Amino acid sequence: MSLKIHNAMWPGLVGKGDDEGQEPPIGLEKMLDLTAAADVGGQKYEGIDYFLFLPHTDPEASDDDLKKIADMIASKGFKVGSLVAPVWPGTVGDSAMGDQEQKDKFLSAVKMACRIAGIFNEHGVRDYGVIRIDSAEFGVEAWKADAAANTSKIAATFKEAAKIAADSGERLAAEGEICWAGMHSWKDMLDLLEEVGMPESLGFQADLAHTYLYLMGYNAPEHALLKDGYSDEEFYAAYEQMTDKLRPWTIDFHVAQNDGEVHGAGSHDKTGKHCPADDPNGKLDIVKCAGYWLKDYADRGIKHICWDGCMFPNAMLEDGKTWNTILDTMIKVREAHS
């Protein structure tokens, strides 16, 4: 089965806002139009993944309003794939390792996402993809105060969330990103997935930019697999070690590039810096690295790949060349691995 090629809509939202130094959000329809305009030898993007929150989507929108959004997406020639539940403080949710009130908010965000997924599925605009979550606990300092107990708190919340998703016929994918407590290193991520222990309902979402920093031990030096100045041979040995551990859990995959730096914008804590697909400072051979994650992808139910260019400047997002370069890279990934 050939993987479908998707573009993410949330780069129009994440890190954007009205605060000093921030750029304004880019609306959903504008992001759809930018994506639809891309063309590489007649190949187009086939779908989109997106974040279920304002200003793109009101997570409490009526069924009819959500169907109108589905109509608009379908009119651009797209399917909807994976959805991002609004689990973070300041959206619908709150910390998965917080008190009962915070956990209840987290779970309410998952319920909202499952409801919207169901409407899109019934509409016909969506027939594959997962719902993405993370621990919604910014930074790792509070987690470190009692790492084992706090991982257990997150795992307990994730188990409840996974049951909600399973009852709706959905799967959850926890995104490995260094800014989220209990998910900030490859080892802590693996420990969390194993403690939840529900692989049929909760798996891992691998992002090339974020997982590069897992290798370097950002936010968890004790779990570093590489040191600065590494050779190609050392890199791929470490990469294989990491992917062999996390790939069996991987049910959703983001193609991306990273230059080895961390980056934050607005309220978003510093995390892996997403770079253009052709960034000369990029640390990754995107096509080769993607293969480590996509081995046996069909066995894990993966039907599409998505580009993530989180926190790109608006000028870059609004430049058609950006999306053609990304699409060309995505096509190469698909041709090499599916």
Image (tube, helix red, strand yellow):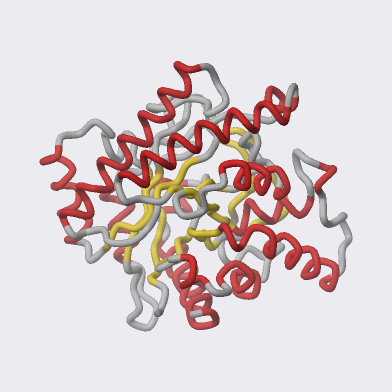
Q: 151 or 31, which is in the foreground? A: 151
Query: How many labels sit on residues?
Result: 0
Q: Residue at x 49, y 38 (%)?
A: 159
Q: 76 or 98, which is in the foreground? A: 98
Q: Position of residue 192 (x, y in %)?
A: 63, 42
Can I make out residue 11 in this image? no
Can I make out residue 9 in this image? yes
Q: Position of residue 333 (x, y in %)?
A: 53, 75
Q: Residue at x 86, y 55 (%)?
A: 228
Q: Is residue 152 left or right of residue 95?
A: right
Q: Is residue 216 above or below residue 321?
A: above
For the N terminus, the image quarter is bottom left
State which quadrant residue 292 falls in.
bottom right
Q: Position of residue 187 (x, y in %)?
A: 73, 47
Most extreme residue toward the left is 64
Q: Position of residue 39 (x, y in %)?
A: 35, 74
Q: Residue at x 46, y 54 (%)?
A: 200
Q: Residue at x 83, y 42 (%)?
A: 221
Q: Is residue 61 left or right of residue 148?
A: left
Q: Is residue 257 left or right of residue 39?
A: right
Q: Is residue 235 left or right of residue 208?
A: right
Q: Is residue 208 above or below residue 44?
A: above
Q: 321 or 43, which is in the foreground? A: 43
Q: Is residue 287 above or below residue 190?
A: below
